[in-house]
Image (cartoon, rainbow, N blue to C red):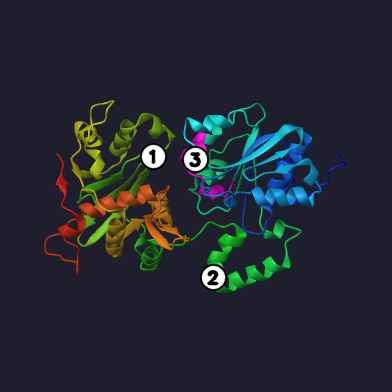
Amino acid sequence: MSQLNIDTAKVFRPLLEPSRYKGAHGGRGSGKSHFFAELLVERCVLQPTRWACIREVQNTIKDSVRQLLADKINKLGLSSAFEILETEIRGPNNSLIIFKGMQHYNASTIKSLEGYDGAWVEEAQDFSQTSLDLLRPTIRKENSELWFSWNPTSSKDPVDLFLRGPNCPKDAIVVEANWKDNPWFPEVLRKEMEEDRAADADKAGHVWDGKYQTAPKGAYYARLLAIAKTEGRIGFVPYDPVHEVRVCFDLGNGPNMSAWFLQWIGLEIRAIDYLQGDEQAKNEGWPWYIKKLREKPYSYSEIILPHDAAPAQRVTGKGDQQTLVDAGFRTTVVPKMDPAERVKLVQRYLPRCRFDETKCADGLEALRQYQSNYDERLQLDKGPLHNWASHPSDALGHGIQAYQEPQGFKMSGAIGSAGRGDRRAGY
């Protein structure tokens, strides 16, 4: 085989060095996907390689990078060395490239990838924490690598937090690449970019410059929060020791468990603090949260929990509600509510809310990113998208479900108990 020559943009050259994790993030037209595709083709030519190309969701092979790899193989003059099949690509040195969606894997089936040399996760901003936790220990072969290419939507995207956050792995090379870094940026994309900037500068900043989204398509609360900021309802919100604090939870595991600290003062719902679980919380469970609650300088009225907090767990024999009661807290369990109806309820009461911008920063970011799961193909709204932003948003929703009008005050057209569901009192 003749010598293989592949031109590489300067921004990607650090990724040519060996590393357990390799990441490239940025906007459209940067060449991220093209770089990783060429790197994978080159690897197959140089040594025996088994590689998985993965997306969070892959309904058909058209959703994968298969066609991009096929185009690279043809462009590099390697068509005779590769066999491009419908669901996989076979290459020199008995190399194999497969294409999968993580929705097809679980803890048992993902074991089929244990002998692979690596995986490339494309559109990694959509990769869930569960998928990341499944994939990382599975690709375990000596000198194996995990590649990620993505345009970040939020600093809370699991892959963004993993590779750009405060505790990113030491054995990682991550680069930012945007259209300016692409020496082959085509004129047709330049014209498209200029049109996008003229139409919506904020959106173009995400699409082309790799900035975090200010609000995703179908965001439920972003506009209302922007209004709240303009009206001065997002800023410094002090704790009023005259009034007790209600803590509303959404249940989950570790980072998926969230809580808002609310005070109902007059007609206002004041969010004075926010709590998000972490890896330690994942290991310890309720003792971690109870400790955090007790460390806060607040006087508590009640802990507000979702409908599934009452049933006893198989291992402990206690439900989440009983665990808190045993720790000395009063509790209220709100009834089950359709998620779409809860969104409407929160939208109605957000104009009453004030948020401490510093203490509630993570929770506010989740509220801004909370969005609908809209199926473009079917033109169908499937309700709220279940991702990292849904847990904090649901937690606030549970608090508003439990909200009661103060005596002497009535909100014009306020939703009554039929809209929120009757509260089920705790202990």
Check the picture and name the quadrant holding the C terminus: top left
Q: Which residue is mark 3?
A: 104
> Foreground residue, 270 or 390?
390
In the image, residue 2 sits, relative to residue 198, either above or below, namely: above
Residue 410 image point, x, y percent? 16, 66
Who's the residue at 57% across and 63% down the image? 205
- On screen, residue 60 versus residue 118, left or right, reads left
Q: Is residue 341 visible?
A: yes
Q: Quadrant of residue 200?
A: bottom right
Magenta stretch contains residue 127: yes
- Single out the mark in the foreground, 2 or 3: 3
Separation of residues labelled 2 and 1 (CA atoms): 35 Å
What secondary structure is marked by label 1? Answer: loop
Residue 232 image point, x, y percent? 36, 65
> Foreground residue, 312 or 333?
312
Q: Amino acid at mark 2?
A: Asp
Who's the residue at 40% across and 66% down the image? 223
Who's the residue at 32% across and 56% down the image? 237
Q: Amino acid at mark 3?
A: His
What secondary structure is marked by label 2? Answer: loop
- Single out the mark in the foreground, 2 or 1: 2
Over which residues does the magenta segment extend?
A: 122-134
Q: Main secondary structure of the magenta part?
A: helix
Mark 3: give few (<14), some (14-19) or many (20+) Cα within 10 Å.
few
Residue 13 image point, x, y percent? 74, 45
Q: Which residue is mark 2?
A: 200
The image's mark for residue 277 is 1
Q: Quadrant of residue 143?
A: top right
Magenta stretch contains residue 192: no
Separation of residues labelled 3 and 1 (CA atoms): 28 Å
> Foreground residue, 403 or 118?
118
